Image (cartoon, grey):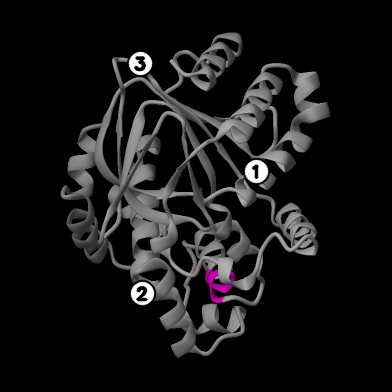
């Protein structure tokens, strides 16, 4: 067991989270603790943007053209929410554990501006598409920061006093590391990566409402054709394909966790045709909504 895994195990013990299956907010805003006791097969889901740290176990993320494996002692940076296929593995019978950390845009912009004053970054460092996403090793400085964060999580007073300062240091460490270019690209307000990220945030916040490519393009001050090209360059999918995946994953969650019926779930996530929803659901998850509902 790594030092970070030991610290998170102690945190779970002190906060009565040893039976947790899933993820939960912690006492530091923007930080979530995730834990699951068993491996899970490859399945579609939506990864939220942020910094993901695995302390125990390992995961494999599948892209259309490649896959990324990351595990204990690794971290992953996602500049935007993404529908992906993921499988998770418990190593040596131990639970999968880790942290996910949101990146506050205002804090990110402030840190990048300060780093640019010291010539820490140039425009060539900007991430432009999904192919630049890789896992990276924590490194001594980042691991020490995470140790302090985990310690603070277990103490409400320390979490309140030190929490945001530790998060600031953590984001700086990530910006300075091998995956820093992803966050740097996100901070460049007028770059294609940042514009697509803003459109994705809109899609995730309003997936149940009617959304058009024209409206998304206008919202980020791009022509429809330029937006379409930039969106595909970043996500390897068209805007409508991406939106469909988000809606299907949200519907799956409603059926699996809330007991919603197929028709009800379809309309809640923005479908207007129940039959179209059922066809696309079965194609995406390899089982019908009713078959999935029967399992829960």
Q: Is residue 36 above or below residue 250?
A: above
Residue 264 in view in this figure = no
Element on which disc 3 rests: loop
Q: Could you give the CA–CA distance between mark 1 and mark 3, rounded to whole angstroms?
A: 28 Å
Q: Is residue 125 above or below residue 24?
A: below
Q: Position of residue 84 (x, y in %)?
A: 34, 52
First in residue order: circle 1 vs circle 2: 1
Disc 3 residue crowd, few under 14, some 14–19, many 20+, Cα 10 Å: some
Q: Nearer the viewer, mark 3 or mark 2?
A: 3
The dot on residue 94 is 3
Q: Nearer the viewer, residue 104 or 144?
A: 144
Instruction: Tell me where the magenta segment starts and ends, as one range.
Output: 192-196
Q: Quadrant of residue 27?
A: top right
- Quadrant where the C terminus is found in the figure: top left
Name the outermost residue toward the front: 119
Q: Position of residue 263 (x, y in %)?
A: 31, 54
Question: Is residue 194 a member of the stretch shown in magenta?
Answer: yes
Element on which disc 2 rests: loop
Residue at mark 1 = 173
Q: Residue at x 22, y 63 (%)?
A: 275
Q: Residue at x 31, y 23 (%)?
A: 90
Q: Quadrant of residue 243?
A: bottom left
Asked whether, in this view, residue 32 is left or right of residue 171, the answer is left
Q: Position of residue 251 (x, y in %)?
A: 36, 51
Q: Nearer the viewer, mark 1 or mark 2?
A: 1
First in residue order: circle 1 vs circle 3: 3
């Amino acid at each position: 067991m790594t030092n970070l895994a030991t610290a998170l195990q102690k945190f779970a013990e002190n906060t009565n989270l040893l039976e947790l299956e899933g993820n939960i907010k912690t006492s530091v805003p923007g930080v979530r603790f995730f834990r699951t006791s068993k491996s899970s097969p490859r399945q579609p889901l939506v990864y939220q943007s942020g910094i993901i740290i695995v302390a125990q176990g390992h995961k494999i993320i599948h892209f259309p053209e490649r896959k990324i494996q990351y595990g204990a002692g690794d971290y992953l940076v996602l500049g935007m929410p993404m529908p992906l296929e993921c499988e998770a593995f418990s190593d040596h019978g131990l639970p999968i554990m880790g942290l996910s950390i949101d990146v506050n845009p205002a804090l990110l912009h402030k840190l990048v501006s300060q780093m640019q004053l010291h010539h820490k970054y140039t425009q060539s460092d900007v991430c432009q598409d999904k192919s630049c996403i890789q896992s990276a090793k924590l490194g001594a400085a980042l691991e020490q920061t995470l140790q302090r964060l985990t310690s603070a999580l277990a103490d409400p007073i320390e979490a309140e006093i030190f929490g945001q300062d530790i998060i600031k240091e953590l984001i700086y460490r990530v910006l300075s590391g091998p995956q820093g270019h992803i966050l740097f690209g996100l901070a460049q307000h007028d770059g294609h990566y940042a514009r697509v990220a803003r459109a994705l945030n809109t899609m995730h916040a309003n997936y149940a409402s009617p959304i058009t490519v024209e409206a998304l393009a206008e919202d980020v001050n791009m022509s429809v054709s330029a937006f379409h090209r930039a969106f595909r360059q970043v996500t390897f999918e068209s805007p409508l394909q991406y939106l469909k995946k988000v809606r299907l994953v949200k519907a799956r969650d409603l059926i699996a966790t809330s007991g919603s019926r197929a028709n009800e779930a379809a309309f809640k996530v923005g479908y207007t045709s129940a039959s179209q929803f059922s066809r696309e659901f079965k194609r995406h998850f390899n089982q019908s909504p009713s078959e999935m509902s029967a399992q829960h």
